[in-house]
Amino acid sequence: MLLMLLCIQAVVQVPVVSEATPAPPQNIHVDKWLLTWTPATEERDVTYTVQYRSFGSIVWKDVRACNHTSLHSCNVTLTRDESKHGCVMLRVQAERHGLTSKPVKACSRYGDSCSPEVRRVTAQPGSLTVYLSRNHSMVWEHGDHVTHRVYYGKQEESLQQEYEDGTSSVFIQELEEGQRYCMKVQYLLYDKPAGLGSCTQCEVIPVSSHKPKQTDVIVVVVVVIFVAFLISGIGYFLIFRLHRFKQWLQPPCEIPPHFLFEPFPEHHICSYNSSIREGHCDIISSTE
């Protein structure tokens, strides 16, 4: 009995070591269907599996030639039935002892029949312009049913939240100046993503040289407030104090000198009574 208790205690005290999930691969690039990647760590016993998804499907399938391979590259070869419309999406995941990492999608550094060609990216204050090429086989085959979708966002953000669609070029506005934005492009066939997306490119949005400084903004605000008070004061004065202003402008109320008659010289007005032969005279000095 004592021996059994000791054995049970020894088993309980043995630490259980859990297997860690392998880290996902990095730098997964495609160049003319040659898929390459780099391992995240120097772990041993790690294999890699390449998967593809055809147009219009939501199911990822294993590429037969790149299933549980210990290499860091794979030449993807698919039949016409496996790749509808000739374009597929690719991703790679690491595996060790039955545990798989998070799959990472592949991107194309150079444009081809299934990946958009980004000619150049121009950053301006508050905006980003992505110049694309329409000279590829998908346009020749499907015409206007093929467009581009540009995913963009700040460097630390996901590139699946914001996007703009366009044909030959895409203009993105209302970007924060001084911040670093990243973008990638993917074909849209009948409004659905098709083929490999381009590899992520990042640009810093420049700051406008004409952007007003803080002191300039303060001066403008002060001037605006002063003008507003001035206009308000003038309006109040014209509405409520205009009669006072008129009184102040009126001259003193006096009769102008030219309105008065000049004094007459002394004149005698006489009357004469013939019956009594006697006369009477009055003296007039002035008249107003």
Image (cartoon, rainbow, N blue to C red):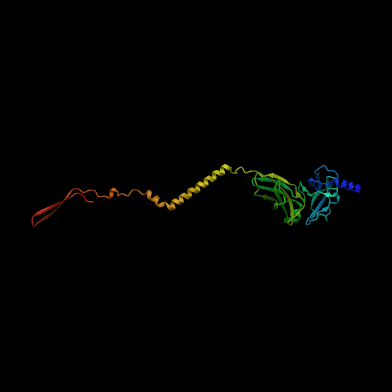
Q: How many marks?
A: 0
- 145 lies above or below 4: below
> Percent from the top left, x then y, of residue 72?
83, 45
Work out whether residue 153 or residue 146 is closer to the camera in this orientation and state it. Answer: 153
Question: Is 266 left, or right, of 22 in this rendering?
Answer: left
Q: Position of residue 178 (x, y in %)?
A: 65, 44
Res 82 quadrant in image: bottom right
Asked where in the image residue 277 lies, by quadrant, the reply is bottom left
Q: Position of residue 253 (x, y in %)?
A: 32, 50
Residue furthest front as drawn: 2
Drawn side of residue 223 relative to residue 47, left or right: left
Q: Position of residue 171 (x, y in %)?
A: 67, 50
Front residue of this view, candidates 66 and 136? 66
Q: Residue furthest left?
A: 276
Residue at horizontal 49%, vertical 48%?
229
Q: Is residue 204 left or right of residue 61?
A: left
Relative to the observer, which residue lies in front, 98 or 114? 98
